[in-house]
């Protein structure tokens, strides 16, 4: 069998996941993802399965794959928003993902961004690197109100760590784990607008879908946001209207925007976010730890093999 591997995290990180894939005996081809539709269309039919990252598995790609050998799309990671699941169901292409493998890594990355922002760490490192002794004034986080939009595995881990730092906990989600909320004294906001008007820090941890695409708009920032909000996005770039983020920063509605994801990745040259020091961007590395990559890689391989041999 012939397999296409496009996840760069899988490829770039040594670990047992490579052994697991090599032991299958499959023929492995690699590409550097995320791979777009125009690249996949000419080649997808010759593969029995793929291990993909955030590649564009559109209806056209899936239909072309079905006309050839394609049987399985094994997603390295959790989010399936780049895969046309309706088309996969229609053309009987098995789609799998890796739930529960990266929430620790992503939660830690979110907190790394929050602490770095409030303590001016990026600027201070750059000052001292170039021989300056510039002592900026930072902020404490103790006592602030933090909210998560999306109380899934990652959102829960963010709030557990927030509790240790002495913050007040808030959450918005359509589906609430009442036992978890009670255990950790979390206040529930019934709307996203209420979360934005109440808290000092918000972490976006929602799965992307048609309902919440670009849900962070100029309107919610203008009319429902507590001034000075710090907004963090480690989920999907498409959750926010990037023009609205720039508006929020320019008008000092947002104190900062810390993001690990963009609407289009890799980042395009001259991206408007680069004009603002209080927008901090990391290149989609929230789950890129040796431990997380190995867990995700092993599960992606296991899912692939199991699906192909059914």
Image (cartoon, rainbow, N blue to C red):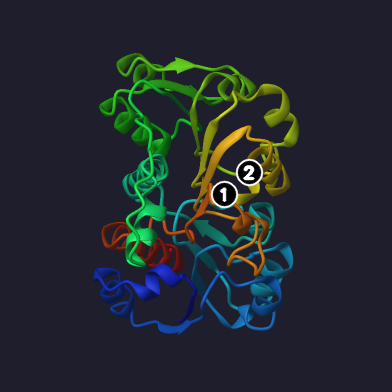
Element type where label 2 sits in the image: helix
Identify which residue, 28 or 249, lies in the foreground: 249
Residue 141 in the figure: left or right of residue 273: left
**Residue 9 locus on image (x, y percent):** 40, 68
3D distance between C-alphas at marks 2 and 1: 6 Å
Image vertical order of residue 169 relative to residue 291, above or below: above
Element type where label 1 sits in the image: loop
Q: Residue at x 33, y 65 (%)?
A: 131
The answer to whether residue 299 is seen in the rendering is: no
Image vertical order of residue 138 relative to residue 24, above or below: above
The answer to whether residue 144 is seen in the rendering is: yes
Q: Disc 2 marks which residue?
A: 239
Residue 285 in the figure: left or right of residue 294: right
Image vertical order of residue 79 relative to residue 145, above or below: below
Q: Quadrant of residue 146?
A: top left
- Position of the N terminus by quadrant: bottom left
Identify which residue, 112 or 45, lies in the foreground: 112
Q: Disc 1 marks which residue?
A: 236
Crowd around label 2: few <14 · some 14–19 · many ≥20 (10 Å): many
Q: Residue at x 59, y 23 (%)?
A: 226
C-beta proximity under 8 Å, tags 2 and 1: yes
Q: How many marks?
A: 2
Q: Residue at x 34, y 58 (%)?
A: 125
């Amino acid at each position: 069998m012939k397999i296409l591997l496009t996840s760069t995290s899988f490829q770039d990180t040594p670990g047992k996941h490579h052994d697991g894939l090599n032991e299958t005996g499959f023929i492995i081809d690699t590409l550097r993802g995320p791979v777009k539709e125009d690249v996949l269309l000419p080649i997808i039919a010759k593969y029995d399965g793929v291990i993909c990252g955030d590649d564009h598995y559109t209806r056209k790609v899936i239909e072309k794959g079905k006309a050839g050998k394609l049987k399985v799309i094994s997603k390295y990671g959790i989010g399936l928003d780049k895969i046309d699941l309706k088309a996969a169901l229609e053309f009987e292409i098995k789609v799998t993902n890796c739930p529960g493998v990266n929430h620790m890594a992503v939660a830690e990355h979110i907190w790394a961004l929050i602490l770095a922002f409030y303590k001016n760490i990026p600027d201070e490192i750059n000052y001292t690197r170039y021989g300056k002794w510039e002592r900026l004034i930072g902020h404490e986080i103790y006592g602030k109100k933090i909210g998560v939009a999306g109380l899934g595995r990652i959102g829960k881990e963010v709030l557990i760590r927030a509790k240790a730092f002495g913050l007040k906990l808030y959450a918005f989600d359509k589906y609430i784990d009442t036992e978890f909320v009670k255990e950790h004294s979390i206040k529930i906001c019934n709307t996203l607008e209420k979360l934005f008007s109440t808290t000092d820090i918000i972490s976006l941890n929602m799965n992307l879908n048609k309902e919440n695409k670009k849900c962070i708009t100029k309107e919610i920032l203008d009319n429902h946001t507590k001034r000075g909000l710090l907004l963090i996005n480690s989920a999907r770039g498409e959750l926010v209207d990037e023009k609205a983020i720039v508006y929020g920063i320019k008008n000092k509605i947002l104190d900062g925007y810390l993001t690990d994801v963009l609407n289009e990745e890799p980042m395009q040259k001259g991206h408007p976010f680069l004009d603002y020091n209080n927008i901090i961007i990391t290149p989609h590395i929230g789950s890129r730890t040796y431990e997380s990559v190995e867990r995700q890689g092993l599960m992606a391989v296991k899912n692939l093999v199991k699906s192909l041999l059914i």
